[in-house]
Image (tube, rainbow, N blue to C red):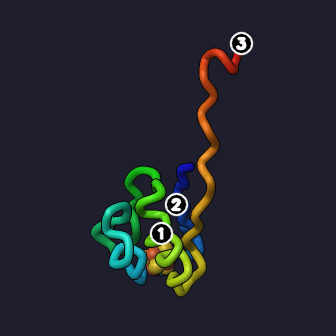
Amino acid sequence: MRWQLRIDPTACTGHGLCADLLPERIELDEWGFPIIHGDVGASLAGHARRAVRACPALALRLETKPRETTRRERS
Ligand code: SF4
């Protein structure tokens, strides 16, 4: 299973805590707002959940990534 991080840009206040807790997937832009890189696999899921819980603005979410369908399943 894989997950994807989502940021609500209207709620995010640029604390930067998420990037401190999950530097493998989140970096900050020049104004201190997060940029997400890639999906979250099982090895990082715990760290990602911790970053979500720590966000003081409740702006960070971790969603289950929909499984990609194969060509055979589509036909
Ligand atoms: S911790 Fe929350 S408010 Fe702070 S930069 Fe990350 S998403 Fe935005």
Q: Residue at x 37, y 61 (%)?
A: 25
Up/down of 7 relative to 41, above or below: below
The type of residue carrying mark 2 is Leu
Reading the image, the residue beneath label 1 is 48
Q: Are marks 1 and 2 in contact (CB under 8 Å)?
A: yes
The answer to whether mark 3 is within 8 Å of ligand 1 is no
Per the rendering, the mark at residue 5 is 2
What is the CA distance from the residue labelled 1 to the residue labelled 3? 35 Å
Instruction: State the residue at coordinates (28%, 69%).
Output: 30
Residue type for callout 3? Ser
Name the residue tied to disc 3: 75
In-image side of 75 versus 43 (left or right):
right
Give coordinates of residue 67: x percent, y percent.
62, 39
Q: Quadrant of the C terminus?
A: top right
Pinpoint residue 33: horizontal percent, then vertical percent: 39, 71
Q: Is residue 30 above or below residue 54?
A: above
